[in-house]
Amino acid sequence: CIIVAAVALGVGATQPAAAAGENFMTALKNGDVAGAYNLCTPALQRELGSEQGMQTRITNGRVQPTQWSFSSRNINNDTAQLDGTVTFTGNREGNVTLVLAQVGGEWKISGFNLKEK
């Protein structure tokens, strides 16, 4: 019973980060680049340059997600990582990794890797 409680606590602790990751992926799926961009840390926004920069990365990489599943959630202090599988437009399979950081008490995307298998 103690192990079950610890596992439940662990999943609960990752929930806010996982929710932020889900929101980011949903925004990309819906073509809401502005929404996805706004869920990124200021540092990642600077790296991308603009919402258009993010759009270009998604479009040129042909990595617009249609569905995904996170199989691994890890948090270490103020950093989280979500790993899983993703299906892109055209029914292509791939992997997804989202790295998140806490900014002002909110989880934000600090890096992402969407890659076709």
Image (spheres, helix red, strand yellow):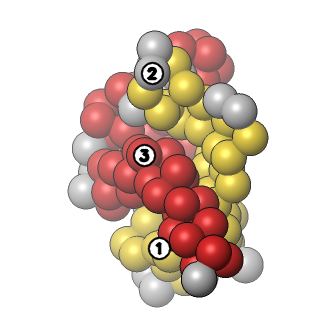
The N terminus sits in image quarter: bottom right
Element marked by disc 3: helix
Task: Tell me if 39 is positioned left or right of 56 in this view.
Answer: left
Q: Is residue 56 above or below residue 41?
A: below
Question: Which residue is drawn at the image coordinates 26% and 44% (left, top)?
Answer: 32
The crowding category of the residue bearing disc 1, from other C-alpha atoms within 10 Å (few below 14, some 14 to 19, many at least 20), is many
The residue singled out by tag 3 in the image is 16
> What's the residue type where badge 1 is placed?
Trp
For residue 71, say whether it is visible.
Answer: no
Q: Nearer the viewer, residue 47 or 23?
A: 23
Element marked by disc 1: strand
Q: Nearer the viewer, residue 53 or 107?
A: 107
Question: Which residue is drawn at the image coordinates 56% and 42% (left, top)?
Answer: 57
Q: Which of the labelled discs sits on residue 105, or is there none?
A: 2
Question: Which residue is drawn at the image coordinates 62% and 67% (left, top)?
Answer: 6
> What's the residue type where badge 3 is placed?
Pro
Q: Earlier in the sequence, mark 1 or mark 3?
A: 3
The residues tagged by marks 2 and 1 sit, at their Cα atoms, a distance apart of 26 Å
Q: Nearer the viewer, residue 83 or 112?
A: 83
The C terminus sits in image quarter: bottom right
For residue 30, say whether it is visible.
Answer: yes
Q: Is residue 112 above or below residue 37?
A: below
